[in-house]
């Protein structure tokens, strides 16, 4: 059984059919490169996998569990949010929050998830929240260390180079430990020196 299985994925924008029944499967640890012309649907495909855009048809399964079958399933926003956690996405244009430092950008999603989970389980206390927040900060610092930016943790995106911003974006995508990590042309806006830095 494939780790990721996509069947008959369809996406339309008005009268334009962008994804025309995409089928693919990947085994755990396998890498897939999607190559095509600009405007050919590569980003749309990745956004559909991450449920940032909703396909008009088809299904997506991870580890044999059908996440969504877009032809006959209605799911709540909360279910979609949980299903999104299977995927991480590194955007082409970084998409860092300018009002947050590098470390805050990396820890933000985990903090939001943990706070919501504590409230849903009715186990929210200030002490429990502060403990999780402290752990998330340490984890974020470790991810920044792994991408060589521990010394830039308190810098804002405008204080970082393009390559550094992209490495922060990679650390952020890894912060929730996704099963599948997607990269949307993560080096296309960078010069050759910064490209090798990110790679």
Image (cartoon, helix red, strand yellow):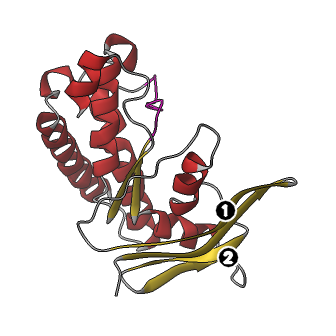
Residue at 60% from the left image edge and 37% from the top image edge? 38
At numbered mark 1, what does the secondary structure look like: helix, strand or loop?
A: loop
**Magenta region's main secondary structure?**
loop
- Residue 54 is tagged as 1
Left or right: 92 with respect to 154? right
Q: Which residues are magenta?
A: 91-99
Asked if residue 61 is positioned above or below residue 80 in the image, the reply reads below
**Quarter of the view holding residue 18:** bottom right
Q: Earlier in the sequence, mark 2 or mark 1?
A: 1
The stretch drawn in magenta includes residue 171: no
- Residue 70 is tagged as 2
Inter-mark Cα distance, 2 to 1: 8 Å
At numbered mark 2, what does the secondary structure look like: helix, strand or loop?
A: loop
For this rendering, which residue is in front, 35 or 88? 35
> Could you tell me residue 3's position as x and y percent?
34, 77
Q: Tell me the quadrant of the picture where the C terminus can be found.
A: top left
Left or right: 161 with respect to 70? left
Left or right: 107 with respect to 152? right
């Amino acid at each position: 059984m494939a780790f990721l299985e996509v069947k008959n994925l369809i996406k339309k924008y008005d009268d334009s059919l962008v994804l025309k029944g995409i089928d693919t499967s990947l085994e755990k640890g396998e890498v897939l490169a999607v190559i095509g012309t600009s405007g050919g649907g590569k980003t749309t495909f990745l956004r559909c996998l991450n449920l940032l855009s909703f396909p008009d048809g088809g299904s997506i399964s991870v580890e044999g569990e059908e996440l969504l079958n877009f032809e006959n399933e209605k799911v709540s926003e909360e279910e979609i949010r949980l299903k999104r956690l299977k995927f991480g996405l590194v955007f082409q244009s970084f998409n860092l929050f300018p009002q947050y430092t590098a470390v805050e950008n990396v820890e933000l999603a985990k903090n939001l998830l943990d706070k919501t989970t504590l409230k849903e389980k009715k186990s929210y206390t200030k002490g429990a929240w502060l403990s999780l927040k402290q752990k998330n900060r340490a984890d974020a610092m470790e991810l920044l260390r792994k991408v060589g930016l521990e010394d830039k943790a308190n810098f804002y995106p405008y204080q970082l180079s393009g390559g550094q911003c992209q490495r922060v974006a990679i650390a952020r995508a890894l912060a929730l430990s996704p099963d599948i990590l997607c990269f949307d042309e993560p080096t296309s806006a960078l010069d050759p020196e910064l490209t090798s830095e990110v790679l």
